[in-house]
Image (tube, rainbow, N blue to C red):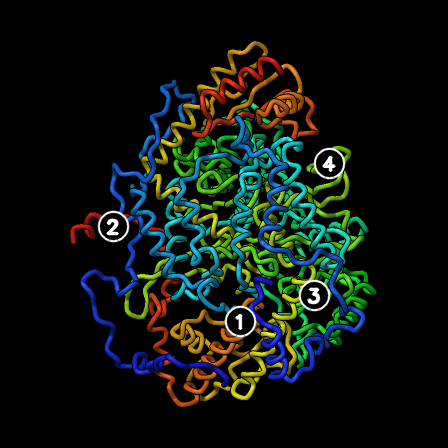
Amino acid sequence: MRYLPLTPTDRRDMLAAIGAASVDELYLDVPAGARLSRAIDLPDHLGELEVERDLAGLAAQNLAAGAVPSFLGAGAYRHHVPAAVDHLIQRSEFLTSYTPYQPEISQGTLQYLFEFQTQVATITGMEVANASMYDGATSCAEAVLMASRVTRRKRVVLSGGLHPHYRNVVKTMTGYTGFAVDVATPDVTGSEDLTARLGPDLACVVVQYPSFFGHLRDVTRLAQRCHEAGSLLILVVTEVVALGLVKPPGAMGADIVAAEGQGLGNALNFGGPYLGLFAARAPHVRQMPGRLCGETVDADGKRGFVLTLSTREQHIRREKATSNICTNSGLCALAFCIHLTLLGGAGFAKLAAINHANAVTLAEKLGGIAGIEVATPAFFNEFTLRLKRPAADVIDALAVRRILAGVPVSRLYPERPELGDLLLVAATETTTTADMDALANGLREAA
Amino acid sequence: MAMNREGRGATAPTATAPGAPAPAATFSGHRGLQYDEPLIFEQGQPGRMGVDLPEPQPIAARLGGLGRTQPIDLPGLAEPQVVRHFVRLSQKNYAIDANLYPLGSCTMKHNPRLNEKVARLPGFADLHPLQPLQTVQGALGVIDEVARWIKLLTGMPAVAMSPGAGAHGELCGLMAIRAALIARGDPRQRVLVPDSAHGTNPATAALCAYEVDAVPSNARGRIDLAAFKQKLGADVAAVMLTNPNTCGLFEDEILEVADAIHAAGGFFYCDGANFNALVGRVRPGDLGIDTMHINLHKTFSTPHGGGGPGAGPVVFSAALAPYAPLPYVVHGPQGFALVEHDSGRAFGRMKAFHGQMGMFVRALTYMKSHGGDGLRQVAEDAVLAANYILAQMQDVLPPTYPAPCMHEVLFDDRDLKDTGVTTLDLAKALIDEGYHPMTVYFPLIVHGAMLVEPTETESKASLDLFIGTLRSLVARARAGEADAFHAAPRLAPTRRLDETRAARQPILRWTPPSPKQAAE
């Protein structure tokens, strides 16, 4: 077995040193009936060649999004990741290190976390950011829990523009601790008015920006109204690249930003691992979930970094912790950090501008097709189309023609037949004119 | 000690002695291969980029007036600078690829590179989670196959694949318990958690609105069965027991624990963080458990990545299986299908999509590489290695609890008493010897705890050198070299860091120097 260095002689010598006749003697604390005397019925070990062939066979049964024109979004976006990113995150010292519990030999991880936190705070327009959560949806749920700790209230309003999976994760995470979750009806065009739902018992309002349907809406006024009522405004961003072009959440008065960071540095990965971003206002820092990296000095007075404010965390505070999270998305945060460092502020803005330009171009092409209407008035790189027939049927028909035409809203809202004709379509910097033409032709025939 | 020290120079204790001259100051700030690396924010300049992007097509913006008005204050660096920056940072990290990583309860084993290669195949890495199901049959097949291996290895009938890490898996298990109890019309209030448990256990119970009731450990480092039984009652929803536990011991009265909790109408949650000791040798399903999470980033070797991402699939008994969260893969008439919406008993959804696919691919590659025979050998070698360390240390540093241990061995600071050397000092001295310290001060029930987990991927020579090092440090502590210990580490990229200062005046992001500072 290529991964096991001990030889039969080593094992014999080690057993002799221990004073045991066989390894079975080391398992004598296991109840006799639970000791397996032989291997479980699974195939025996295989060489690299055989395993790789086997797994490659499974991979070949899938249609890679990059192999065909692809317009899927709805919380996961296909962007170009510079080659340096994947090379650097595979450095042994990043890939095979543990959580930086011993800071003297973890400065590499700690320094990039400090840089990552600064980047996240900068692009969201917030004051502080943590070292990551599992994904955008769990970040969103943690934001709701934090808002409740800050306000000592337990009613929550979720916008009808919030990603339905995020909504469900919030409902799940708050399901057993006495929360009231008030969900607005699906808001395709961004016209909902949530102010009637505010009140002195409200912990927070959660609004997605751009919304699940792609719409961009100014929430400055909503933030003011929330603050007047002593409530927090949580902004959710599922496409982080948008922050290169749109007004930052912090500038509109958001108190917490929960975002999905996959769009920078990270592959689609069929939904995971992804990267939860979490940013907040400085006065609330001690209510934040997750790890925080902070600057300090060493015994020689030299700058260094450590995990800090850990009295919020489960390993110290146990049942009184702000969250139960331990392992997070460290390596995904590194990929994000490297990609954003390569881009810089100017590159990030330009990347976002290209995304928007491609989406506008695509919307113009598709909006000109008879029977198709662009339902989203203002958007970043994703918008909703209203078709004349069920979007799911159109998607299946175009998949046969090797076009991944977008996400039918019905996949996430099966209980809402009135949304069945809606199709979410996203364009990124990877979308070519030929891709757009292929989709337009396909929709002309299938929709 | 049978250890070949031929060709090794003295470890130069004088270099770490107090009053020894500080390493020569250099003009560059670098010291040999240790580079002093500023933050990216201190290196960037406007007008530079590490990417070349085409000009966007001219369009009329449709942002609804919500365009940014301020430039984004992030530095510009060219690719060579970015690569150099992150390579230099990487060199300040310890890694399992460089040396033994004896961090107890963390299972820092070798991460095979084949797993990385396979996870990057476009047929896995470049799949959108919401593609039509007929275009992702191979991916659903991977999830189904990992689930099958996990069910066989644990002897449990069902598994939820979506949780993102161990703590997330704990939450999944406890939420299923809560849902099952509510369905029974009996939600209950209390969860029993041994005092040796990892902090995630009580934190998770709190998220399910359970009151946490700590159960003491007995003198043998196991759950105190009598105290446990005394705490049982009609309001106890579950017990959360780690097995092997955080003292590195198999809970030898686990069947009694299972019987007692079931007799009281509660459920048995097992924390599976330490499954590496059992895989292929013991099936948790034979121990009376109802649910348990598996850390794919421990037992199944997906890399820790400096703190994640991990994956925490959760196995369920038949009684809890109907409450497993969405989504899940099923076998349908046209191949695999994905249940994403359910009017049934699923307690909810834990993540945006279907789980940590990148980790599933790596874990399946690892499982197939080892096979059923290799996985059994993994557990045996891991347990053998830990017991070997115990045996070779016990004359100078007796273990907290008598042998045998499982895959990790627990020491404490009893034998350092009166030396002036603490567990932390010993840990920091290990750094100068080129080792990442063991887990220290955990579990909390043991004074000055030192939890050592070598894993199965160390050679005997590697174990011997570690043992020799640890023995020499204990000897030096007893020889009165406390001052040298207090000064450690001296050879790491930084000296001891001031954690109190970091917490008292938190600086959590870089801020540009004020004009006054900049002028100085």
What is the spatial separation of the Cα atoms under label 3 and label 1, in whole angstroms? Answer: 40 Å
What is the spatial separation of the Cα atoms under label 4 and label 2, in whole angstroms? Answer: 60 Å
Q: Quadrant of residue B135?
A: top right
Mark with earlier residue (4, 2) = 4
For the question of whether residue B460 can be seen, the reply is yes
Q: Position of residue A9 (x, y in %)?
A: 60, 77
Q: Position of residue B11 (x, y in %)?
A: 36, 80
Mark 4 or 1: the one toward you: 1
Left or right, A170 with reference to B481: right
Mark with earlier residue (3, 2) = 3
What is the spatial separation of the Cα atoms under label 4 and label 3, in whole angstroms? Answer: 43 Å
Q: In the rendering, which numbered label is found on residue B421?
A: none
Q: Which residue is mark 4?
A: B335
**Residue at left offset 75%, top offset 47%:** B323
Q: Which residue is mark 2?
A: B513
How many labels sit on residues?
4
Q: Which residue is mark 3?
A: B192
Tell me the kind of residue under disc 1. Ser
Mark with earlier residue (4, 1) = 4
What is the spatial separation of the Cα atoms under label 2 and label 1, in whole angstroms? Answer: 50 Å
Q: Relative to A388, is B413 above or below? A: below
Chain to which mark 2 belongs: B
Mark with earlier residue (4, 3) = 3
Q: Which residue is mark 1?
A: B459
Tell me the kind of residue under disc 4. Gly
Disc 3: CA contacts within 10 A as few (<14), some (14-19) or many (>=20) = many
- Which element is circle 4 on? strand
